[in-house]
Image (cartoon, rainbow, N blue to C red):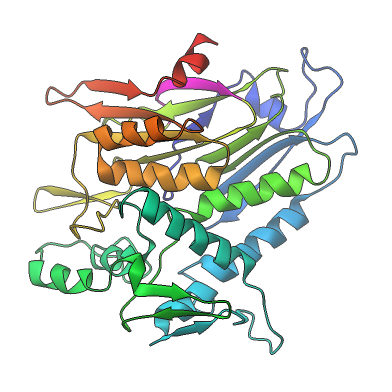
Amino acid sequence: MNQARFFILLMSGFLGLFLGCQTDTAPHRTYSQMQGETMGTYYKITYYDSLGRSLQPGVDSLLAQLNQEVSTYIESSTISRFNQSEKGIALTYNPYGEDEPYENEHFKKNFALAVSMYRTTDGNLDATVMPLVNYWGFGYSEKRKITRVDSNRIDSLLEFVGMDMVDMSSDSLRKKKPGVQLDFSALAKGYGVDLIGTFLANRGIQHFFVDIGGEVVVSGESPRGDAWRIGISDPRDNAGLEDIQTAIPITDRAMATSGNYRNVYEANGVKYSHTINPQTGYPERSSLLSATVLAANCMQADALATACMVSGADQAMEYAKNDNQIDVYLIIGLPDGSLDVRYSEGFNTYFDK
């Protein structure tokens, strides 16, 4: 999550496979690859299409539309227009500056899941956290390190946080205070992954791997002819980008990881991470270093992985216990520098493979 590469695709000779070479185990399939940039990070897609179509123009068009609705880095986007408004916006707002009404389908779906996850996680996933994200230097505003924490300022910003500060009707999205702002960064990459997965499936493609900044959905078989193997990064400070803690063979599932070991900065000897606790106003500092979530769709996995990092290991395990459609894998840092691992029962199925 958040511009970090948490997953590593593990497959022997993967460069050749990604470039479309045939394999010994799947001799009748030639996999294709496309890649590019979106949402401030990369995307990579590997897929088998018996018709040999070039699908990148359609993918890029979809991702551009999604960004135009949910990116806080685009001033004309729907979410930016809402954030800049005093009272809210009409949901027919056209982020392309045209006169005809616009559906804002992607924005609405992100907002709907944000509301749902806010309730499911008792406020640990809160899309109105944007003012605090900006304060700590991780948002769309000027990037800066906080060298002196202003607790009074944080308390004042907390007055704009809470999904009850936003109300959606059939034709508008209203805010109760001018300072309320939305941030879909814990949802949008996962949503984008699902969007592209649906795009491929609707074109009859059964075997694919979609990765946006480490959030992943897979379907069917890998180029080897078996499950796709996805690695979970080693979160220790001295670990390299390609060092992994474990690898999970999955198919027809989505996987997302959130962690406090990549997007961080240090000021006056204190480390600050991008995971902001919307209930305290401060970056979350716990022994939980990363949370990986498996779910039926990547949007839910993405959002829940962030909620796990905010709520901590015990509550993260409760999320999995309360929903048999998800599984969580947690990496916890111990005082001596070693790692502890906790995971829900469903992960045993993957480890057995």
Front one among 231 and 249:
249
Placement of 27 over or under 63, stated as above or below: above
Residue 150 falls inside the magenta stretch:
no
- Residue 324, given in percent of the width and then of the height, sits at 48, 30
- Identified at 32% across, 48% down, the residue is 263
- Residue 77, given in percent of the width and then of the height, sits at 54, 75
Q: Quadrant of the C terminus?
A: top right
Placement of 82 over or under 146, stated as above or below: below
Compared across the picture, whether 156 is left or right of 220 comes to left
Q: Residue furthest top?
A: 352
Compared across the picture, whether 35 is left or right of 21 comes to left
Compared across the picture, whether 120 is left or right of 145 comes to right
For residue 12, which quarter of the picture? top right
**Residue 213 in view in this figure:** no
- Residue 294, given in percent of the width and then of the height, sits at 49, 33
Front one among 213 and 87:
87
Placement of 186 over or under 243, stated as above or below: below
Front one among 48 and 190:
190
For residue 259, which quarter of the picture? top left
For residue 107, which quarter of the picture? bottom right
- Identified at 79% across, 17% down, the residue is 26
- Residue 57, given in percent of the width and then of the height, sits at 76, 57
What type of secondary structure mainly makes up the magenta span? Answer: strand
**Residue 170 in view in this figure:** yes
Magenta region, residue range = 242-250
Q: Residue furthest bottom?
A: 99
- Identified at 27% across, 73% down, the residue is 160
